Amino acid sequence: MNSHAHVPVLLRGAMASTLLGAALSLVLFVRATPYTLVAFMFLAQPLLALGVALFALQVFKDLRREKVL
Amino acid sequence: MIFTLLAAAGVPEPGEDLVLPPPHGWIGTTDDWARWMGIAFALLAMGLLLLAWRRLRSAGLNGVIKELLILPLVVLPAAIVFLGYAYGIESSKSISACGSCHVMKPYLADLKDPASETLAALHYKNRYIQEHHCYTCHTDYGMFGTVSAKMEGMGHVRRNLTGDYTLPIKIAHPYPNGRCLACHGASQKFLKSEGHPKEDMPKLVSGENSCIDCHGPAHPTVTQAASR
């Protein structure tokens, strides 16, 4: 039997996306090359933005469910 | 022998850069700060996310965790993006960034060769340009110079990655005199030189006459580059 608590899919997505975006950004800070800069611009930034968007969506859904909005 | 003695005295050999000790009270450059803060924020965000994941799996989602998640999911990513831009764009102007592609290495070697008399090497060894040597000469001045240089840089990365180029590499557009004149145009040495009569100025400004025609070569020829 699984004893882990349920984590909403949107929040999972937000966390995974941000984790990956932060890891790619870390590569740029550790070793800046044209390739890591391109990876930061076109992968890390969209992933970090996606993380914020998914988290905002989760918060919005929770507020709607609790009839605050 | 002489170079060994000079090296022992802390004087670099020809071709090496003299590294001066930092002045008293030195706390690093803006780039250094952006880099180390970026590393710290990225590690902090990743650590907090892993910690939050464990808490979520054991205790479930509640108001406290949701509020705490604002830090690694919203605040820190915003800071990382800001610092990443600040550090990434600045570091991409360095000669090591330009020389990180294999195809550029002979040009970088020539640039740093004190015996070379190419225009690029002359500017480098005499420090006519203090830093960002490739970038300064290969970027248009003004607000959109950087933007267009970065756009072209993306194309260079794509071409290098996919091998979509032919050797010898060539400059994409004729070199504009405006980039030379932006520094030299107002200098008295340039204005008073017999080689730059006033009646020829319009041709220089319009690009009809190229600075490189008389002052080149800017970089080693294909044969020279191949031998390096």
Image: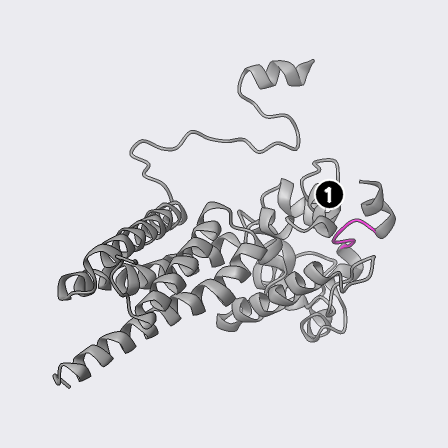
Residue B161 on image: x %, y %: 68, 59
Residue B87 on image: x %, y %: 43, 54
Q: Tag 1's secondary structure?
A: helix
Which chain does the numbered disc 1 sit on?
A: B
Q: Is residue B173 above or below residue B104?
A: below
Residue B124 on image: x %, y %: 63, 44
Q: Give the image quarter of residue B148.
A: bottom right
Q: Amino acid at mark 1?
A: Asp
Q: Assign the C terminus of chain B to one quadrant of the image.
A: top right
The answer to whether one can see residue B119 in this image is no
Question: Per the image, is B218 magenta?
Answer: yes
Coloring basis for residues: one colour
Question: Per the image, is B153 magenta?
Answer: no
Residue at mark 1: B110
| Residue at image coords 39%, 71% | A50
Please state the extent of the stretch shown in magenta in the rendering: B216-221
Between B14 and A20, the residue placed more toward the observer is A20
